[in-house]
Amino acid sequence: MSQGQRGKAKLGAKVAHESTWRGRLWLVALAGAMALAGAGGSYWYASRSGPGAGAGASAVKSGDGISGPLGMVHVPGGEFLMGSDHKMAQPNERPAHKVRVPGFWMDQHHVTNAEFRKFVTATGYLTTAERAPDWETMKVQLPPGTPRPPDSAMVAGAMVFVATNGPVPLRENWRWWRFVPGADWRHPTGPGSSIEGKDDHPVVQVSYEDAEAYAKWAGKRLPTEAEWEFAARGGLEQATYAWGDQFAPDGRQMANVWQGQQVQPFPVVSAKAGGAAGTSPVRTFPANGYGLYDMTGNAWQWVADWYRADQFRREAAEMKTVVLNPAGPRDSWDPSEPGVPVKAPRRVTRGGSFLCNEDFCLSYRPSARRGTDPYTSMSHLGFRLVMDDSRWTALRKQPATAMQPPPQDSAMPLSAQLSSTGVNR
């Protein structure tokens, strides 16, 4: 190993828990620490099961463009215990506290490559990963005094999971993440890769900004953190997983996570997986009690809230009974990353991904949460959207011509359904 390589390895180890921005060539070690595969060692979570939080969780109400928004299911709303008090729960999940959310509609699954392509085709939108970075945006995620990189390093690209040849220390997550110039939603692992044949996979390599842009075009919005967790639980009060308390009931795989793809320890990719690890088509695994697919596993999901590590403690202290429809904090706060400003912008991400595993992540649980730089694009990070009941009610009051569903093979955005009604303006 050259002196330069040893220096890079030393830097990467030092900042293995720092969540930088998208990273650039000179900050590969720093940026690798943005990995959402996990922020700590192995832990186990075994929660108490209980009655369904939402009445009629088994009575799935799907939208067809007439009775409800196309491709969405109705989440009835109600009161539930958000977070966890289990002895092995992470500090940012504590305490479990009562929250009430109103009913809303949610996408049945992640926004797919096909759906995102329609948006890009219609608007000409360039994602964060397809643009050269802005230093003023980038530097707020870095330790104070970090020098500006040379212009030659400020290139478009994104973070890509790269498997290791053998076991590595799990706190050195920079070892399996690389900044790859040219990686973006069309080329998730870099130039030469493609989403051909993967129209029904979650779109990844999209930032919070990208998700917001799509939501505006589609006439929807990102869910709040409370809405997301309520929906993910599927009516199961404090169950360990979105489907119950057993990880693999009767030996059945319930989500796209590392254990299902690999026979090797993370992050070593096995021959069984064809030398790769990645997303699976939406609807591959069973839906939860509300008819929602992949609420955990497959790809992490952006939600609307700013991330505070202590948010649940703040909510529980401020509201002694029930927190009503929380919209999250006004800013970010995360003291867990040495050298990084505690108020560096972070948005909440939820659900875990195909990289989550029993040795390192275990974030395929409804209460697990992470804070992520809103300009981050990674190969295991996507999103899904929601719509308020009131918005759909307003649409239903419009002339019948505005209510016709799009063709069944189309993912027409709600903006098209609303274009002549003014509801989306």
Image (spheres, rainbow, N blue to C red):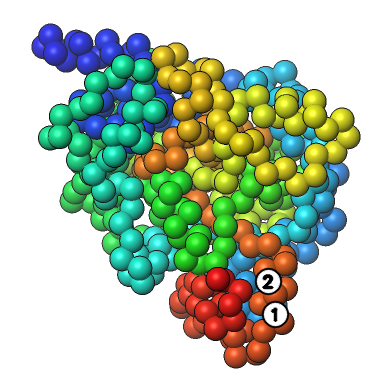
Secondary structure under tag 2 reads helix
User: Residue at position x 73%, y 25% from top?
Assistant: 313
Query: Which quadrant would residue 331 be assigned to in this image?
Result: top right
Vertical side of 363 occupied by 220: above or below: below
Residue 297 visible? The answer is no
Residue 223: x, y in percent? 61, 51
Query: Which quadrant would residue 385 be assigned to in this image?
Result: bottom right
User: Residue at position x 68%, y 71% from top?
Assistant: 392
The numbered mark at residue 58 is none
Residue 353: x, y in percent? 48, 40
Q: Nearer the viewer, residue 404 or 310?
A: 310
The residue pinned by badge 1 equals 396
Query: Is residue 85 toward the left or the right of residue 285 in the image?
Result: right
- Number of marks in picture: 2
Vertical side of 177 occupied by 1: above or below: above
Query: Is residue 409 toward the left or the right of residue 6 in the image?
Result: right
User: Residue at position x 44%, y 13% from top?
Assistant: 338
Going by the numbered disc 1, the residue's amino acid type is Arg
Going by the numbered disc 2, the residue's amino acid type is Trp
The numbered mark at residue 392 is 2
> What's the distance in space between the residues labelled 2 and 1, CA to CA?
6 Å
